[in-house]
Amino acid sequence: MTTTVLAADVGGTKTILAFYDLTAEGLRRQRQHRYASREWPCFDRMLTDFLQRKGPDGIPTQLAGACFAVAGPVQQGLAHLTNLDWVVDQQQLAQSLGLSAVEVVNDVAVLVYGLPRLQPAMAVELQAGEPQPGGTVAILSLGTGLGMALGIATPTGLCSCPSEGGHQEFSPCNTREWQLRQWLLADLGLERLSVERVASGTGLGNVGRWLLSTHPAPHPLKTQLSDPTVDLPARIAAGADQGDALCQDALALWTEACGTAAANLLLTSLSTGGLWLAGGVTAKQLPQLRSPRFLQRLQRVGRFQPLAAQVPVHALIAPEAGLFAAAQRAHQLARGLSRSARQGGRPWGNMDIDS
């Protein structure tokens, strides 16, 4: 009989739910559905709709595990979405599904579980290197904000550790970055500036606004700053591609800030197992993240430059990497529960999280 797991990538803008079957070749996606999150009052209603689409009984009879990757911090199985007034409750989901092998996890932290099963087309190399056996893995996710997570090596595989490192204080590396910091503090009315205010999709917009504020000549983007419907980061990226000097300057400054954020994470985690860049902005800005400008900042770590130069760095470019990782985690949970039941141990007892 086929074993099925449920995976979800729950975000403030969109949510994807999918069933995966376990086959001899690995997990095979059976069916999925994409939802506009803001069109639903709560996640529970959305999940009910998805389960009913499966058939008259809703839940597959062989559903063995479920993982819900959520865009927000998770504490004690409760996730509060960062950009949506939703709460995703692990205990409530377990009761609704009639399962014990259920987990709610941060959407960046879940990516750790997908790394051992990545397919070649899902990632590209930014810096060549040889991962050290047993080395820590770090993830830097460039999206609307800045996410971070660590993968710690254990005897049974990688253990995912969430982080809110994107809210560390932004540390300028030169005079221009100091001027940017001072302007943003005043403009946003803040006493401290998080690194994600600069090194993220939103951060690219902030860098552009600062440069426009100091630009004496007229510029097409100046007339669009007051329009909330304008995607300023996208306009800056497009302007840079078209040769606009201010937009190119903004993208260059932003790229360097991202390189510094990556370098700081590398040092903090000592990620000799590899550094991974993820998030929607990463896929869109691959040329910048492959550039000498980014890599020079990544390796600008003083006496640890030789170490930073040897760490393998990759970018996750698959649009549904989070869903893939959640499916892998759901499978791991199901396997761990099954093995524990056979051995008479606790449900989360001897979990093999790398197979």
Image (cartoon, rainbow, N blue to C red):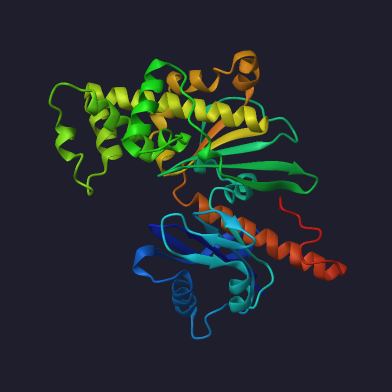
Residue at point 58% right, 32% down? 265
Q: How many marks?
A: 0
In x, y percent, where is residue 177?
Answer: 40, 22
Depicted 173 relative to depicted 18: above or below: above
Res. 264 in view: yes
Depicted 47 relative to depicted 126: above or below: below
Residue at point 59% right, 74% down? 92
Res. 140 in view: no
User: Outermost residue toward the right?
Assistant: 344
User: Outermost residue toward the top?
Assistant: 303
Quarter of the figure with the N terminus: bottom right
78 vs 1, nearest the viewer: 78
Residue at point 52% right, 57% down? 70
In x, y percent, where is residue 334?
Answer: 69, 65
Indicate left or right for 149 with 207 as reference. Answer: right
In x, y percent, where is residue 110?
Answer: 59, 51
97 vs 81, nearest the viewer: 81
Residue 257: image quadrant is: top left
In x, y percent, where is residue 56?
Answer: 49, 86
Depicted 181 relative to depicted 283: above or below: above
Residue 174: image quadrant is: top left
Residue 339: image quadrant is: bottom right
190 vs 25, nearest the viewer: 190
